[in-house]
Amino acid sequence: KAGVTQTPRYLIKTRGQQVTLSCSPISGHRSVSWYQQTPGQGLQFLFEYFSETQRNKGNFPGRFSGRQFSNSRSEMNVSTLELGDSALYLCASRDDRSYEQYFGPGTRLTVT
Amino acid sequence: GDSVTQMEGPVTLSEEAFLTINCTYTATGYPSLFWYVQYPGEGLQLLLKATKADDKGSNKGFEATYRKETTSFHLEKGSVQVSDSAVYFCALSGLKGAQKLVFGQGTRLTINP
């Protein structure tokens, strides 16, 4: 079974721009969550989706948004990028029976 | 709110040494507990988990026991290898079935041959 895939793997953007990251969960998984990883703040929860509905949201500004499609693929969007948004963005999909979460390799976003 | 505290790193050991990485948590109710490992340039991999008090999770020679009385989930391995070098994260999910994970700050482990 293929794992969680994230695209793109690397991204360089300029302050003020917006960016969209994509995540394809493991086949059959309906739950997707997103995390931001930085050296200073560590791993922080962004949001989670289940069957196209956002079920929980972390403490991030409204510039961070996401959505999930009917095939369970998810996207997250960050508008008006700031230097502090530079991070590794990780997506995870969850097995609804075991509740185990499987992470993708991440998208490394650099804002200049 | 829920939180996880890990021993600070980095930790450097020689091959075949005994490993302990301490993890304590604060949570209401009965969280599920996890250890994840992150190798350079990769995402997180689930190493082991425990879902109730006194459960022992184990995988690849690593073990951790869910201790409710001490709110701890320490990671141990009897004999580490160079290939165990990575960053280790302790995490909890606060409610049964909840997807949100709360992570500790991570512990970087380096094993020297």
Image (cartoon, coloured by chain):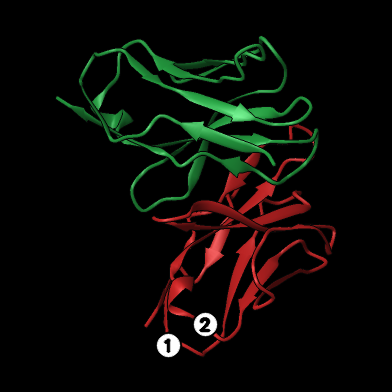
Chain colours: A red, B green
Of B103 and A25, the residue lying toward us: B103
Q: In the displayed structure, does residue A107 sit left or right of residue A65?
A: left
In terms of image quadrants, where is residue B95? top right
Q: For residue A81, which numbered disc appears in the image? A: 2
Q: Is residue A23 above or below residue B51?
A: below
Which residue carries the number 1 mark?
Answer: A14
Quadrant where the C terminus of chain B is found in the figure: top left
- The mark nearer the N terminus, 2 or 1, is 1
Give the spatial CA distance, label 2 vs label 1: 7 Å
Of A52 and A55, the residue lying toward us: A55
In terms of image quadrants, where is residue A48? bottom right
In terms of image quadrants, where is residue B79? top left
Question: Residue A60, how many percent across, how many down?
Answer: 64, 66
Residue type indicated by callout 2 = Leu
The answer to the question of whether label 2 and label 1 lie on touching residues, with beta carbons closer than 8 A, is: yes
- Residue occupying the point 52% across, 89% down: A17
Residue type indicated by callout 1 = Thr
Asked whether the viewer can see residue A90, the reply is yes
Q: Chain of mark 2?
A: A
Q: Is residue A12 above or below residue A74?
A: below
Quadrant where the N terminus of chain B is found in the figure: top right
- Residue occupying the point 77% across, 41% down: B98
Q: In the displayed structure, does residue B58 sit left or right of residue B97?
A: left
What secondary structure is found at the residue carrying circle 2? Answer: loop
Q: For residue B97, which numbered disc appears in the image? A: none
- Residue occupying the point 73% across, 36% down: B94
